[in-house]
C-alpha cells in the first residue's frame, strides 16, 4: 500500500473541489478505487468512471466504475488508465471541503476497535483527534477493505487510519 500515492489523491481531490471542478481524473489503482467507493458511499462524490486519458462521454458517467466498450486493460495501455471522478456541490459549496492524511509513510497509525470507538465518540485516542464536526469522516484500511470509522466500530474491526474528510 503506497501512502504517498494516497496523499496525492487526497490533495488532488481537495484542490479540485476548491477549484470548483465538476469532473477530475486520478491514476487507476485498486487502493484508489476502494477509497473512492468509500467516499461515494459517504456522500462526498457523485460518480466514478474508469476511462482513458480523455474524459468519458456524459452518457458513461454512472454511479459505479465501468469500462467503455471495447477498451480492455492490457499491458500496453495500463499506464493510461484513469479514474474519472465527479465531485458534489451543495448550495454552491463543495461537499468535500478538506481532505488530509492521518497515517503517513513515516508514521503509520494502527488502531483497535476500542480506540476507534473513542474516536467515533469525539474523544482523542493516541495521535488521532476524535470526530467533532457534522459530516466529518475518518477512513480506515481493514482486512475487509476500506471503511468509515463508524462502520468499523459496528463490525468490530480495527486497522490503519488512512485519511480524514470534512
Image: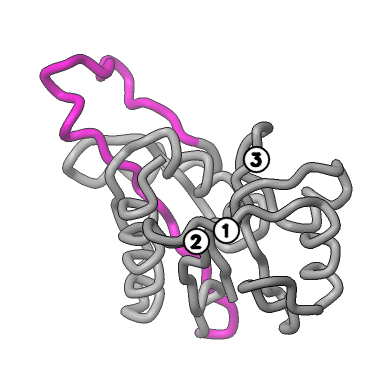
Residue shown at the point (36%, 77%) measured from the top left? 20
Disc number lying in front (1 or 3)? 1
Residue shown at the point (41%, 40%) measured from the top left? 1
Q: Is residue 23 above or below residue 53?
A: below
Is residue 100 highlighted in magenta?
A: no
Q: In which quadrant will I find the C terminus?
A: bottom right
Region of the chain picked out in magenta, as a range: 65-92
Q: Which residue is mark 2?
A: 103
Quote the CA–CA distance across marks 2 and 1: 5 Å
Mark 1, other Cα within 10 Å: few <14 / some 14–19 / many ≥20: some
Residue shown at the point (45%, 39%) measured from the top left? 31
Residue shown at the point (38%, 56%) measured from the top left? 105
Q: Is disc 2 in contact with disc 1, using a CB cutoff of under 8 Å?
A: yes
Q: Is residue 33 left or right of residue 133?
A: left
Quote the CA–CA distance across marks 1 and 3: 12 Å
Q: Residue 62: x and y, percent?
A: 50, 40
Q: Which residue is mark 1?
A: 109
Q: Which residue is mark 3?
A: 142
Amino acid at each position: 500500500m503506497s501512502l504517498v500515492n494516497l496523499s496525492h489523491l487526497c490533495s488532488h481531490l481537495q484542490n479540485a473541489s476548491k477549484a470548483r471542478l465538476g469532473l477530475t481524473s486520478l491514476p487507476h489503482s485498486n487502493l484508489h478505487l476502494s477509497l473512492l467507493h468509500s467516499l461515494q458511499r459517504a456522500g462526498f462524490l457523485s460518480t466514478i468512471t474508469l476511462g482513458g486519458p480523455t474524459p468519458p462521454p456524459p452518457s458513461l458517467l454512472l454511479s459505479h466504475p465501468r469500462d467503455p466498450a471495447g477498451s480492455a486493460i492490457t499491458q500496453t495501455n495500463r499506464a493510461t488508465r484513469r479514474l474519472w471522478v465527479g465531485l458534489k456541490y451543495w448550495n454552491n459549496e463543495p461537499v468535500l471541503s478538506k481532505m488530509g492524511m492521518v497515517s503517513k509513510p513515516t508514521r503509520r497509525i494502527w488502531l483497535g476497535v476500542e480506540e476507534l470507538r473513542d474516536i467515533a465518540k469525539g474523544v482523542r485516542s493516541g495521535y488521532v483527534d476524535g470526530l467533532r464536526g457534522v459530516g466529518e469522516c475518518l477512513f480506515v484500511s481493514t482486512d475487509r477493505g476500506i471503511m468509515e470509522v463508524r462502520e468499523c466500530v459496528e463490525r468490530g474491526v480495527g486497522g490503519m487510519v488512512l485519511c480524514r474528510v470534512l
